[in-house]
């Protein structure tokens, strides 16, 4: 190929590789069990070169999968050397420290062989509804109670399925057939990906991916470097306090912006706790770098080079760098707080360009039967997003997670619960020139008049709401109360007695800029819509 | 006997008349303030050309973007929304999800109903259809007072679980109709979209109520004026789902009209596919700003009930208002003739979705546009000629195209010649469209290489051959009359009506007798609507069942003819589902129960294929040639130039271009071209 033709072909190929991943992810999404997994797009797919470096990834994935998956292929190859792999093999693990941070996430890696040689790998990861242990809560005292962990092993050897492994899955899971189906879907979506990859290599007459890989990596690191140059070099620090399981947790970041790269040290954060809200460093790194990249390099696609520009470190054994055997089931409580911590650093580097704090970690709403009728229902209760430097925050919309809620009708069809209300909370959005997104009030009871259990593992920001920026006020803090008078104060399990209801009030997003500067028309609209009260308009917005 | 179709689009209004001898058409400018004026002007001119009068018209078939525009521009009625107390914010909360992961500035669409007019009513139906709390008359009357005092023109009613039990919606609607002025429109969600998922159903009923006063008024006035002019034939409306319906139904469910234009385009494609005997057809319509893909099997377009209108954020998927009505399933790609090519911050070539539109348009239009577009790329490589572009309606400044490409693409990318840069733009656009087709085809479980590619729009025939090569497709169809395609498609569409019932129960738990009765009732309902316009013996009815493994998102659709003796056969449905699932995914799952998601019923007119024979003009005596740059060969090669009208049944071999007023067909090396008996171009790929 001539140089000219080469340039065109590389551009076309790059697009095609991303499309291969999209196809894989779409197929997985449709085959996944569990409404929340599908709503969440809690899965990802990527294509890797022969060194295990990620070339492209589906854009549908959640941040927690995006960045962890990039590292997991190499980590898995460290356990099973590439030269021991044969056509038809596939590897699997759900080790939180190699995969995506908790045992629910399975990663499957399949080598692509061309002329007897490995030319690349296809990887995909997805959240399996149940893998034994205590199920979804923060109650486990160690990883051993959280479910079955599979170290890196063959899921398939030369086209023969590892039925032993699948038997262990089906024996331990509360939803055995679904879990098996989800794992087989990962396998088949990788097979499709391998076939597509080989097709396109045939079409373009490629024997390997070396040249396209270096094209992608070169362009991506150049693009990242250019984009990062917008942020002044220097060292910036930020601190954040979370409720924790039952005692406050401090998260600390020291961010160093240098020429074309950013490194963040999370040392100084609170040591790992005895309940399952700890976060392995790989998952912390995934969310921390998402926060940085969403602000600074949103246009650069995910691949090894673009991810390499940002490094996240911490001394071992903290809530952000928990080590085996710390429990990690609800690791998103810590992980999803990190983007706001990163934005706190970047606010100093780029004042006036950074959105206010958001409600943070998804409030996972896990209800289960505590009476005669067994059931379990998983949904999310979402708070407000922080106000942006030139627009209001989005109401009841997760950030940084991309997970949406399950519709009330769908939730009520699949479980014996009744939602009695789901409405915006007046004045919950932090006051500001731009208002924070609103939180919501959700009221739920049993349809069959039986006791229910609720895990409070992810109800965070109950003591202080998300902070505003540039003079904007805090969003309202969250509150969870049971109608018998019980107030939720820690992340444990709570009982909702028959006939009672749980009332959740999610946090609002922080405001941006001085409330006195709010556009009077916008304030009048909020007043007439009932999103801001007369009193708040007078006291916070200084309306006459 | 003469039938006339009227397609009112954003810029042009197309009117087509079909008589025993063939088709004739006029194109007039749309008159946005009162769109009926342009339409009547067009009809009048066409009748004058043909020497006919309004009394000679047996049927008028109409499609319009009026409802869509009212939604986009928020020009609909002042609307109130009555919903279950505690849930009035469902319309604003939407999916509670960002539709773009890495864009922190996205905005959600604003609701069609302002929050103060979203009124909660104490009532509740549960998931099993039972009543927890019945609505009280005094509360309904209080809401009616409120609605009256606010000067509301339209009321949408949406209660939780009304898809399962619509009694409360019906009761409240009846009581409101008794107390409100009869000019106030009242719509119920279970009537408009009887499906589970409150946000989508509520959004659909609000959109329907919002456009109904406007559409009723417009359609009523148009019909009255036509009658005054002497027309007394049947008046039918084009639906988004590809069928026609009566004026009365269109006025009741105007939200079903939103995609009528594109549906007409697909209807034409489906008709042409039947004419040329194509059983598996991929239709691709490439316009000025976007390309649209639709799969057609046995002449029937793929349809869906998921659609969104009025996207609020850069035309990004997910930023619009969802409407759950039957719609031809189009995948839209941001690549058309006016799409802008450039280099992004990574130094990567990018084509679209930004578009130069028609004003200023591509650089070559010479109207001040400085951006390099796909059209500029075609001109630069020689795929199109400056002379005679768009039938001579637009004159091109040929030198402006290469200089725009040199500046925006060639130089930033370090490519040594402008032709390669231009060919690269086209190659990337082809790749983008082929990718979209590939991804969508896999979702539907199609082996895309077994399909024929049918192209329409100004750019379809220019891109077809290369896209076909990328997809392994061996036959391309370029229809006659593609320029007024949607309006011709209206004439080819059957009268049809579809209605869906949400079920969401395990197949083996379904109360077969009860559900079968509901389905049969719906069959009678849709048949009745179609029989308003078609004799009973020319109406077919079918039942579509959506079915899946419980807990999974992958829904398989099984469709069968059905009549009033229809009975659900759970065992047979399960067996069919397992077969289809295995074909799609490669394996089946054990011990997971199968769930019946929904049943939808369709009544459809049986239509005979009406075709008009095509007679080619005399073959060209001399065939001129022009130079076209070839990317793979890295040099110019000589293409023969054929006039479309001169092509007959004998095959001519590429490389060649086939020219006509509205488009140019590129017959790449390795392809041959001929005209079918109806005048459609058929390109075949030689077996090599």
Image (spheres, rainbow, N blue to C red):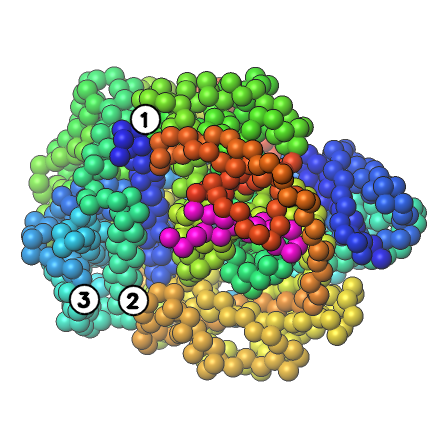
Identify the secondary structure beneath mark 2.
helix
Question: Is there one chain holding both mark 3 and mark 1?
Answer: no
**Residue sitting at 35 percent across and 36 percent down?**
B632
Q: Is residue A457 magenta?
A: no
Gap in angstroms between the C-alphas marked 3 and 1: 41 Å
* Quadrant in which the C terminus of chain A is drawn: top right
- Where residue A23 appears, as percent x and y from the top left, is 35, 51
- Where residue B473 appears, as percent x and y from the top left, is 44, 53
Residue B615: image tag: none
Chain to which the residue tagged by mark 2 belongs:
A
B15 over A268 or under it: above or below: below
**Mark 1 Cα within 10 Å, few/some/many (few <14, many 20+)?**
some
B262 over A432 or under it: above or below: below
Chain to which the residue tagged by mark 1 belongs:
B
**Mark 3 Cα within 10 Å, few/some/many (few <14, many 20+)?**
few
- Where residue B247 appears, as percent x and y from the top left, is 78, 55
Q: Nearer the viewer, residue A346 or B368?
A: B368
What residue sits right under mark 1 in the picture? B347
Residue A159: image tag: 3
């Amino acid at each position: 190929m001539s140089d000219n033709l080469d340039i065109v072909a590389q551009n076309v190929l790059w697009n095609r590789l991303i499309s291969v991943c999209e196809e894989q992810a779409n197929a997985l999404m449709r085959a996944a069990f569990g409404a929340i997994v599908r709503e969440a797009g809690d899965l990802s797919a990527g294509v890797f070169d022969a060194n295990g470096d990620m070339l492209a990834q589906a854009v549908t994935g959640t941040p927690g999968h995006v960045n962890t998956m990039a590292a997991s292929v190499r980590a898995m190859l460290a356990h099973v050397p590439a030269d021991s792999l044969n056509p038809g093999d596939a590897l699997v693990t759900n080790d939180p420290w190699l995969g995506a941070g908790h045992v629910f996430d399975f990663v499957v890696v399949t080598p692509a062989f061309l002329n007897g040689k490995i030319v690349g790998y296809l990887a995909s990861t997805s959240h399996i509804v149940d893998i034994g242990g205590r199920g979804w809560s923060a109650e486990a005292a160690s990883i051993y109670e959280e479910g079955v962990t599979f170290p890196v092993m063959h899921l398939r050897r030369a086209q023969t399925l590892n039925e032993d492994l699948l038997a262990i899955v089906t024996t331990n899971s509360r939803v055995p057939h679904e879990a098996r189906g989800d794992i087989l879907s990962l396998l088949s979506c990788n097979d499709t990906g391998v076939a597509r990859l080989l097709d396109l290599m045939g079409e373009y007459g490629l024997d390997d991916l070396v040249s396209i890989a270096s094209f992608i990596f070169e362009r991506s690191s150049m693009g990242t470097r250019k984009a990062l140059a917008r942020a002044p070099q220097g060292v910036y620090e930020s601190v954040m306090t979370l409720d924790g399981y039952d005692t406050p947790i401090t998260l600390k970041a020291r961010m160093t912006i240098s020429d074309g790269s950013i490194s963040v040290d999370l040392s100084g954060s609170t040591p790992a706790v005895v309940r399952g809200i700890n976060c392995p460093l790989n998952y912390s790194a995934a969310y921390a770098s998402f926060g940085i990249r969403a602000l600074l390099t949103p246009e650069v696609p995910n691949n090894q080079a673009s991810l390499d520009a940002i490094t996240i470190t911490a001394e071992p054994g903290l809530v952000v760098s928990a080590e085996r055997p710390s429990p990690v089931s609800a690791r998103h409580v810590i992980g999803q707080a990190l983007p706001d911590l990163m934005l706190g650093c970047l606010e100093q580097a780029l004042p006036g360009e950074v959105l206010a704090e958001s409600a943070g970690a998804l409030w996972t709403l896990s209800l289960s039967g505590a009476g005669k009728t067994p059931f379990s229902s998983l949904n999310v209760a979402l708070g407000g997003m922080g106000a942006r430097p030139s627009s209001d925050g989005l109401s009841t919309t997760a950030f940084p997670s991309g997970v949406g809620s399950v519709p009330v009708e769908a939730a009520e069809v699949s479980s014996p619960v009744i939602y009695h209300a789901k409405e915006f909370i007046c004045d919950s959005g932090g006051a500001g020139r731009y208002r924070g997104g609103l939180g919501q009030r959700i009221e739920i009871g049993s349809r069959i008049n039986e006791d229910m259990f609720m895990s409070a593992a992810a109800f965070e920001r109950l003591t202080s709401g998300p902070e505003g920026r540039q003079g904007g006020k805090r969003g309202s803090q969250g509150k969870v109360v049971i109608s018998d008078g019980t107030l939720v104060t820690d992340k444990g399990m709570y009982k909702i007695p028959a006939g009672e209801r749980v009332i959740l009030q999610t946090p609002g997003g922080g405001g941006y800029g001085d409330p006195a500067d709010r556009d009077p028309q916008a304030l009048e609209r909020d007043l007439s819509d009932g999103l801001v009260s007369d009193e708040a308009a007078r006291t916070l917005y200084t309306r006459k | 006997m003469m039938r006339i179709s009227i397609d009112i689009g954003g810029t042009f209004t197309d009117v087509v008349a079909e008589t025993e001898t063939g088709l004739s058409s006029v194109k007039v400018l749309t008159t946005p303030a009162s769109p009926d004026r342009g339409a009547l002007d067009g009809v009048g001119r066409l009748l004058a050309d043909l020497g006919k009068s309004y009394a000679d018209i047996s049927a008028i078939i109409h499609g319009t973007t009026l409802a869509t525009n009212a939604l986009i521009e928020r020009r609909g009625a002042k609307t109130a929304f009555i919903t279950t107390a505690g849930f009035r914010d469902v319309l604003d909360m939407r999916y509670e999800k960002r539709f773009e992961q890495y864009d922190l500035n996205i905005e959600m669409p604003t609701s069609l109903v302002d929050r103060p007019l979203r009124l909660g009513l104490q009532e509740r139906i549960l998931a099993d259809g039972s009543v927890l709390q019945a609505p009280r008359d005094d509360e309904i009357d209080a809401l009616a007072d409120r609605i009256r005092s606010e000067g509301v023109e339209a009321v949408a009613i949406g209660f939780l679980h009304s898809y399962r039990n619509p009694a409360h919606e019906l009761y409240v609607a009846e009581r409101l109709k008794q107390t409100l002025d009869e000019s106030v429109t009242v719509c119920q969600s279970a009537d408009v979209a009887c499906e589970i998922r409150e946000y989508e159903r509520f959004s659909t009923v609000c959109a329907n109520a919002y456009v109904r006063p406007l559409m009723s008024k417009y359609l009523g006035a148009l019909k009255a004026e036509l009658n005054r002019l002497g027309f007394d034939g049947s008046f039918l409306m084009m639906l988004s789902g590809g069928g026609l319906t009566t004026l009365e139904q269109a006025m009741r469910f105007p939200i079903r009209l939103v995609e009528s234009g594109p549906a007409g385009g697909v209807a034409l494609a489906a008709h042409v596919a039947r004419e040329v005997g194509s059983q598996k057809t991929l239709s691709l319509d490439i316009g000025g700003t976007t390309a649209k893909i639709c799969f057609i099997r046995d002449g029937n377009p793929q349809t869906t009930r998921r659609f969104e209108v009025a996207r609020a954020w850069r035309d990004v998927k997910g930023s619009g208002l969802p409407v759950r009505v039957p719609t031809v399933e189009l995948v839209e790609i941001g690549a058309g003739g006016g799409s802008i090519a450039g280099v992004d911050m990574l130094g990567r070539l990018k084509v679209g979705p930004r578009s130069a539109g028609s004003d200023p348009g591509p650089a070559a239009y010479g109207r001040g546009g400085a951006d390099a577009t796909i059209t500029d790329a075609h001109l630069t490589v020689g795929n199109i000629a400056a002379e005679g572009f768009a039938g001579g309606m637009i004159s091109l400044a040929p030198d402006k195209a290469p200089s725009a490409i040199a500046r925006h693409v060639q130089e930033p990318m370090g490519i040594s010649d402008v032709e390669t840069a231009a060919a690269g733009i086209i190659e990337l656009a082809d790749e983008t469209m082929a990718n979209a087709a590939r991804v969508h085809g896999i979702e539907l479980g199609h082996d895309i290489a077994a399909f024929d590619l049918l192209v329409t729009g100004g750019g379809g025939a220019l891109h077809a051959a290369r896209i076909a090569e990328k997809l392994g497709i061996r036959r391309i169809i370029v229809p006659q009359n593609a320029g007024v395609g949607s309006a011709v498609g209206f004439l080819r569409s059957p009268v049809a009506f579809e209605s869906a019932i949400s079920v969401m129960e395990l197949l083996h738990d379904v109360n077969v007798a009860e559900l079968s009765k509901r389905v049969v009732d719906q069959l009678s309902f849709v048949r009745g609507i179609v029989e308003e316009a078609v004799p009973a013996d020319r109406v077919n009815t079918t039942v579509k069942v959506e079915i899946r493994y419980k807990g999974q998102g992958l829904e398989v659709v099984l469709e069968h003819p059905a009549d009033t003796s229809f009975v659900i056969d759970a065992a047979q449905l399960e067996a069919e589902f397992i077969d289809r699932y295995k074909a799609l995914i490669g394996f089946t799952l054990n011990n997971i129960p199968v769930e019946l998601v929904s049943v939808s019923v369709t009544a459809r007119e049986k239509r005979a294929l009406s075709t008009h024979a095509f007679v080619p003009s005399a073959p060209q005596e001399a065939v001129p040639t022009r130079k076209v740059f070839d990317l793979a060969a890295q040099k110019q090669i000589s293409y023969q130039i054929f006039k479309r009208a001169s092509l007959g049944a004998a095959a001519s071999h590429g490389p060649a271009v086939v020219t006509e007023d509205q488009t140019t067909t590129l017959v790449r090396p390795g392809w041959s071209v001929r005209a079918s008996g109806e005048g459609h171009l058929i390109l075949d790929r030689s077996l090599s």
